[in-house]
Image (spheres, rainbow, N blue to C red):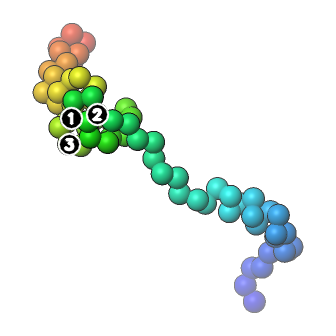
């Protein structure tokens, strides 16, 4: 016989473990640019804006940040 647990897991302990198993619906917010539903702290999947910044603005600021680093 293979390895077996020494004791039965009580209903309370089993249920406590399973209380963590439920998948939660992620938080949602609305894009200020196109009013599409999006996740907070993520860029908008519809228009690519992050807050009022466009995807291009973000790219430019990243390039700037890299240039000023050195
Ligand atoms: Zn948007």
**Which residue matches tag 1?**
34
Provide the secondary structure element on which disc 1 rests: loop
Q: Name the foreground residue: 8 vs 41.
A: 41
Provide the secondary structure element on which disc 2 rests: loop
Q: Earlier in the sequence, mark 1 or mark 3?
A: 1
Q: Is mark 2 within 8 Å of ligand 1?
A: yes
Could you classify mark 2 by the number of other residues whose Cα lies within 10 Å: few (under 14), some (14-19), or many (20 or more)?
A: many
Q: Is mark 3 within 8 Å of ligand 1?
A: yes
What residue occupies the far front of the structure in this picture? 35
Q: Residue at x 84, y 69 (%)?
A: 10
Relative image position of residue 33 (x, y in whole percent): 21, 29
Q: Name the foreground residue: 69 vs 32.
A: 32
Relative image position of residue 5 (x, y in whole percent): 80, 75
Check if mark 1's residue and mark 3's residue have beta carbons within 8 Å. yes
Vertical placement of residue 26 versus 4, above or below? above
Provide the secondary structure element on which disc 3 rests: loop
* Mark number, residue 31: 2
Q: Quadrant of residue 43?
A: top left
Label 3 to label 2: alpha-carbon separation: 9 Å
Q: Is residue 70 visible?
A: no
Vertical placement of residue 39 versus 14, above or below? above
Label 1 to label 2: alpha-carbon separation: 6 Å
Check if mark 3's residue and mark 2's residue have beta carbons within 8 Å. yes
In the image, 60: left or right of 50?
A: left
């Amino acid at each position: 016989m293979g390895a077996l647990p020494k004791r039965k897991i009580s209903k309370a302990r089993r249920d406590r473990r399973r209380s963590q198993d439920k998948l939660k619906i992620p938080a949602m917010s609305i894009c200020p640019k196109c009013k599409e539903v999006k996740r907070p702290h993520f860029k908008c999947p519809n228009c690519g804006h992050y807050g009022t910044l466009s995807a291009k603005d973000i790219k430019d600021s990243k390039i700037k940040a890299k240039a000023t680093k050195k």
